[in-house]
Every structure is written in structure tokens, then in C-alpha cells.
Image (spheres, coloured by chain):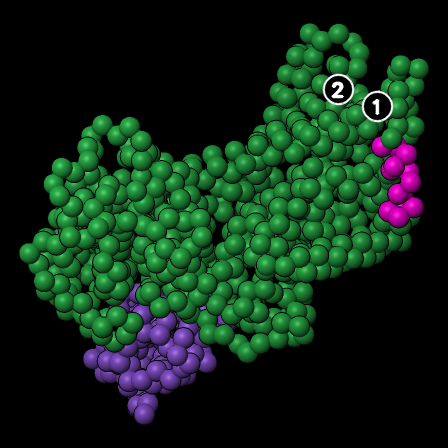
Chain colours: A green, B purple
Amino acid sequence: MSECCTPAPYKPPAPVDNSQALRTIALIGPPNSGKSTLFNRLTGLRQKVANYPGVTVEQRMGAMAGIGRNDLTLIDLPGIYSLDPFSEDARVSVEVLEGRMPNTPKPDAILLVLDSLHLTRQLMLAAPVLALGLPTMVLLNMSDLMEMRGGEIDPLRLAQELGAPVARISAAKGTGLESIQLFLNRHRGEDANLAVTTVLPVVGNAVSAHKWAAQVSARTGYRAPLSQAASRRLDAVLLHRFWGPLFFLVVVFSVFEVVFSIGQPLSDGLGDVLARAGAYVTGFLPDGWLRSLVLDGAWKGVSSVLVFLPQILLLFLFIGILEDSGYLARAALIADRVMRSIGLNGKAFIPLLSAYACAVPAIMATRTIENKRDRLATILVAPFMTCSARLPVYMLFIAAFIPPIAFVHGLVGLQTLVMLGLYLLGFLAALATARLLKSSILKSSQTPFILELPQYRMPTLRSLGLRLWDRGGVFLRQAGSIILAVTLTLWVLANFPRHNGAAPELTQSIIGRLGHWMEPAIAPLGFNWKIGIGLISSVLAREVMVGTMGTLYGSDPQTQSLSLQTALRHDLPLGGAVALMVFFAFAMQCTSTMAVVRRETNSWRWPVLQFAYMLVLAYGAAFAVNWAVHLLWM
Amino acid sequence: MLSELEVGSTGIIESVNLPPGVHNHLMYMGFLPNARVQVLHRAPAGDPTVYAIDGLEIALRRETAQAIQVRSTRSTQPAARLPRTRRSLSKDAE
């Protein structure tokens, strides 16, 4: 901690004993007030930010590198309306603030983030936070938007009223942050009590808190911005009885159409480049086992997964636009009726939607659901939602087996329809399972549905870019670690035991014997032994399936020269291919998800039950599909 | 009852009769006695309904809105741009 500019204070310590330099700062604010955006600004980290309440569900910490204060730790907390805990995530905030959260230092100072657009109501949180007695700075976020829409506030008057420094900032644009610097540099505990007497209301009472907040905002000349006319006009269409659901369907459909029509050519191009690069590099290696290991084992396996990067990024771009714009909350509203019919509410829909990206953050996002049983049901069905790791598997098998037929003048492709069907299948499985759970072991009375609709916002390029960078990084790291390790292991298993110093026939290798040993179990599904190996290795993560296929077909002399798609077409009947996609729609092939379910439910019982249930369902459905395709085509 | 107000109309909250946890949550969102609430939209399925209160838009299901007693006002805020802004004539909820 060689901090040149903060020498130890030479003045005798102030009466209060928190006069040492600040170390830990907490970010607090109501839901959707922009804490996470500010957190990203201040730390330079890429916390997920979206325009709906409840994105941050556990505290996150980071050094404040974004403003050059690596010595300070910033804690981002879930949004809260008050300090009386109502849901799980509010409880997290209270525990951190009171220093009761294990592994999290007690904050020495607070940055209270308030949304200037709704200041009066947001001030209700200021009272209990100021009453904590920690040095606090009040940040009026989105002040640019407020002024643009005709709002007004006098920060100086507000600072006098609250007895705390107040600054206007825009976390999205990064303006006003220098005032935070000043606050952090100057704050040594002794200038906390200006000559201001702050009268706080009774803490823990909404009526008095509201009265106080209304008086403060009146005295400080706060004028709320003009009504959100544009947002409401948009909602008049997007929540319309007829146009609303139609728009929803069009959005969903066009996402997949674009993922196909733009993503597929990009992906093919990337595949070409990777194949050439692999051939070029291995040209320097002598012909022999090393070359085979590098090219057939590692490179083919890893690049067969890497080629799906364009589609993954496109998918996350769309999800990012939907989240940042504020449309997601409207989707939850539209879906509430469906969710209610299965015994859940629209709030459960938001985690389920984000499970389209990945089940792990989705399961963490279920903490916003107040009812414990509803939350557990949502956790248990979330892995049915088609996550982005299934995308490579679907893309590979659809491209290999489903002909690119187009209907309606090329607007609707058969491949897109199959893809949509698979997404729908996962969704329906989630609904049916939730219904089953809610009418049996997780029965409970209906909990009220209270959803705040954020105003529509234009997604910023910065936020979308950071999101893609982040997700792309996760995907690449996965390819460089798990998938590389699996493909290398597979290559070894496929090339041993050596036969007179040379690689054995694939069927004679360790993996071949293992595969043939398990073949009877999967033959009824139309799978061959190579698929069987893929099913086992992909328990780690679904996209490992694709890497496994790349390595196994790459190691087989008969299919070595073919592209992976052609090799699959040669080796797998149509029934098996469709059954495989259905298997992946249902099966829980993801150890990360199981780990997070274990953590969130605090027992191994639920992830084990979930895994078994999904496996049985996947096996049964794949069996039925294989059989049906046989009947229809053979 | 709040659930009986039509889209576009405005009411003044008189009381909220819900379990303490929910009640508290709603109060912090602005559902306090004497607060003015306007009905903005209904979801395509007819439920939930979006209400404007205290500069916020909050969606509630019918059964929650039924537990909120309101008196309807005649002097509504301009809401002419909303579709179907017919106001109920004499639905004074007790």
C-alpha cells in the first residue's frame, strides 16, 4: 500500500474512531438506479448491467481502478427499497452494511446512488442509510436525463438537508465522477459533520419515510421530469392486446433468423480460416504422433467449438439489447398469464429468459423471487431453457442433417424452424416441469406479483460492447481450458494402446472399446458409440460435445479428410441426429449449473434429483423421436 | 377497489389490506394513503395491470389490486393519448 498522496493524518483523531483512511466503500441504491453501471465505471470491471430491477443479486467487489484508486475496495450491492429485508437480495445488502457477511469487509463509507428521475421516492432510502452513521455521499444518477426531460434539483440545498455531500452524475456517460474522487480523497472522518442538523424520520416506517422524502424534495426545489410520454406511447403498442404478443413473437423469431442467416456464413468463414491456420502451423511439425496430437487432437477439437463464436456473440447482442432497452420487463408482464397457469409468476420469467444465455446467472437471479418454493421451482426448471452452450450442438447437427429449404419467398427457413422448435421444446419442458412441481412437492399459495417497469432506454454501445467482450472471453476461456483438456484426453484414449508403435484402429483403442461397451445402452436412441463418448464428455459442458465429435472423427482415418458435417452424415442416421438434438434439449449436461444449484439450495439433493429427472426425460424423448423418425421415413 | 378502475382513470388510495411483508414493499413503491394512482395499461391477457404512481410504473395482478381501496377522482391528469380512456361514471369504491 505505497500510497504517496495520503499521508497519515497528523491531526489528533476525531472523536469518532473511524478516522483511518477509507478502505471499503459500499454502493447502495434502489433497484435499477444505475449502481452496476457506476460500479463498472469506478472499477473498470464488467459487471452485467441490464435495464430491469434486480440484476445484481449478490454483492460484488472490485478495486476502484477505474478512477485510479486501487487501494480502495468497492462493493456493489443488490438494489433495495428500504433496510427492512423483504426478499433474499435485500437481506444480502443489509448483512454487508452491518458487517455480518462472511468474507466481506464492513464498509467504511457509502456511495448512495439515487435515480434523479424518481428522486422523491428514492429519497426514502436515504433516511435509513444516513442513519447508519457512516460517511455517505449521495449521487444523483441520470441527472442528464432528468434535465433533458425538464426536471430540476438543487444539489447544494439537498446536501444541506441531508448533511451529506451530493453530486450529480451520469454513470452511463461517466460524467461527475471527479466529485467521487474528491469525496474519497478528502474524507478522513472529521469533516462528516458540517454545521447542518439533519432531522431523520423514524426508521422502518414507510409512511414517515415517504413524508420526510416528500418534504426534503419539496424544500430542495426538486421538480420531477415531465411524464414519460414516449415510454407510455411505446407501451400502448408493445403491451397492446394484439400487437404486444405479436411483436414479442416477431422479436424472438428474428433473433434466430439472424443468428442463422448472418451467423452461419460468418461461422463457416471462421471455420475455413481455422482449418487453414491449423494446416499451416502443423506443416512445420514432423509427420507422426506429435502432429496428429496437435492437429487431429487439439486443433480440430477446439476449433470445432470456436467456429460458433459468431453465433454466440450475435445471440448475446440480442439478449443485451432486450435487457438494456427495458423490454424484458414488458416480456415478463406479457408472460405473467402463462406463468400463473403453471403456478409461478411473471418474476420467474425474467430468470428463465436470461437462462437463454446461461443457466448459471439465471439461477442466481432467482433470488429476486420472494417465495422460497417458487424460487426452488424456478431453479429446477431453468436448465431446460435453451442456453447458449446448446447452440453449437444444435447448429452442428442442423447444418449437417436439416436441408436448407426456404418457405414464403425465402423469409422462413426450415433450419430456423427446427431451431425454434428446439427452443420451444425446452421452454415447454420447463413449463410442464414447473407445473408438476408446483402442484406436488412445491405447492404454495400464490405470491403477489409486483413488477416495476423501467423506462425504455437506448442501449449504449459501451454496455453492449462490454457484454460481448465478456461473454466472448468466457467462451474462449472455456474452449482454451475444458475443451482443450477434454480433446487432448480423448486423443490419448483414441491413440492408445499403441499397436506395433502405431496408433490402433479406432475401434481397438481404449475409447473405442469403452464406446462399444456402452453402445447397447444408447443404440435404441439411434446413437453410435462416438455419440456415446460425446454424451459422457459433454456432462462437463454441452459444447464439449462438438469438440469431442471433432476429435473423434478427426482421429478416424475413414473420416479424417471429410468435414465434420459430412462425416456425421456418413455415420449417423437421421433418426439418431434428431434424437440427439432432442436429448440435448432436455438433458442437464453442465457441471457448472449443478454446482450453482448445489450452492443456491444448500444441498446435493436438488441437483442430483434434477440431473436424474432431466436424464430420464432426455432418454425417453430421444428414444421416442428416433422411433418416430424410423416409422415415418423407413 | 383499484382493480375496478378503468384504463386511463385515476384514483386516490385510501387503504391497503395485504400481509405485512407485501404491504411494506408496496408502501415503499409509493402505494401510500392519499397517493394518486393512474391506470396505464393492461397486459395483453387482461391481467396484470400497469399503474402509474409517484412517477413510477408498477404492474400488479388483479388480486393484489383488489386489496387496495381507492376513491376515484374526476379531475384526472391529462391522459388523453391513452387508448380507451373512458372513465367509469359512478364507480365510487368504498
**Residue A53 in the image, given as x and y percentages of width and height:** 40, 58
Residue A521: within the magenta? yes
- Residue type highlighted by circle 2: Leu
- Which residue is the site of mark 2? A293
Q: Residue at x 68, y 60 (%)?
A: A605
Q: Amino acid at mark 1?
A: Asn
Between residues A401 and A429, which one lies in front from this camera angle?
A: A429
Task: Say whether marks 1 and 2 touch (CB < 8 Å).
Answer: yes
The region drawn magenta spans A511-523
On residue A37, which mark appears?
Answer: none
Q: What is the distance, in whole Å, between disc 1 and disc 2 at their CAs?
A: 9 Å
Residue identified by numbered label 1: A495
Q: Quick one: quadrant of the N terminus of chain A? A: top left
In reply to whether residue A74 is colored magenta, the answer given is no
- Secondary element at image label 2: helix
Q: Secondary structure at mark 1?
A: helix
Question: Furthest-left residue in view?
Answer: A195
Q: Is A150 situated left or right of A327 in this image?
A: left
